[in-house]
Image: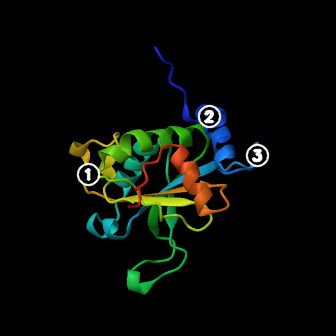
Amino acid sequence: MTKLVDLKTRFNKEIAPELKKTLKLKNVMAVPKITKVTLNVGLGTYLKTHNKDYSNVVENLTKITGQKPVLTKAKQAISNFKTRKGEVVGIKVTLRGNRMYDFLNKLVNITFPRVRDFRGISPKAFDGQGNYSVGFKEHMVFPEISPDDVMKIHGVEICIATTAKTDEQGLELLKAFGFPFKTSK
């Protein structure tokens, strides 16, 4: 029987030395790492249809991440978007440490395969500094969400912050973690 190794231990023992060779780095400390994962949900259309009740979205993000989300509020009033200063416009969760590695493991091995018609994620979604963003139109792809309990479908944006200096280093880092990128033909 093989023992399951968590992603953090696997990174330190297998992925980091391998990345050092492939990126031709001289020091192990120069190997890029994932620093944090942030999940965001915008409440724009959700608030209009549910009378400013976003407790269901907070509950969903808590189930997905295992951590209580933070409410983001509007910094200024914008009349075109019908928002007032101090009004809740979004919900976010920032994961670090062991929870981050557990979430990444779940994202790569369970969530991505559950997406309908999934053919890989785009390697072009890097921000120029090695950070990656991916979005889901439906929050129901996460295994913690039961389709019977869903009141309204909302999207989830996931931002993965890394210490990579370039997009190429970030791409190699995420490939080493097992992210299923599309191959160009």
User: Where on the picture, by quarter, is residue 137?
Assistant: bottom left
Task: Name the residue furthest top.
Answer: 1
Residue at left 57%, top 60%?
A: 131
Pinpoint residue 146: horizontal percent, then vertical percent.
27, 41
- Frontmost residue, 157 versus 162: 162
Disc 2 target residue: 14
Task: Name the residue furthest right.
Answer: 27
**Compared to 108, does 92 lie above or below?**
below
* Amino acid type at image mark 1: Arg
Mark 2 or mark 1: name the one nearer the start of the chain.
2
**Compared to 112, does 165 lie above or below?**
below
Residue at left 44%, top 59%?
A: 134
- Residue count near mark 2 (Cα–Cα under 10 Å), binned few <14, some 14–19, many ≥20: few
Mark 1 or mark 3: name the one nearer the start of the chain.
3
Kindly state the secondary structure of the residue where label 1 is placed: loop
Discs 2/1, front: 2
User: Where on the picture, by quarter, is residue 107?
Assistant: top left
- CB of mark 1 within 8 Å of CB of mark 3? no
Number of labels in the image equals: 3
* Amino acid type at image mark 2: Glu
Disc 1 target residue: 116
What is the distance, in whole Å, between disc 3 and disc 2 at their CAs?
A: 14 Å
What is the distance, in whole Å, between disc 1 and disc 3 at their CAs?
A: 39 Å
- CB of mark 2 within 8 Å of CB of mark 1? no
Kindly state the secondary structure of the residue where label 3 is placed: helix
Pinpoint residue 120: horizontal percent, then vertical percent.
37, 53
- Frontmost residue, 89 versus 157: 157
- As drawn, is 63 to the left or to the right of 161? left
**Quadrant (top left/top right/bottom left/bottom right) for the C terminus:** bottom left
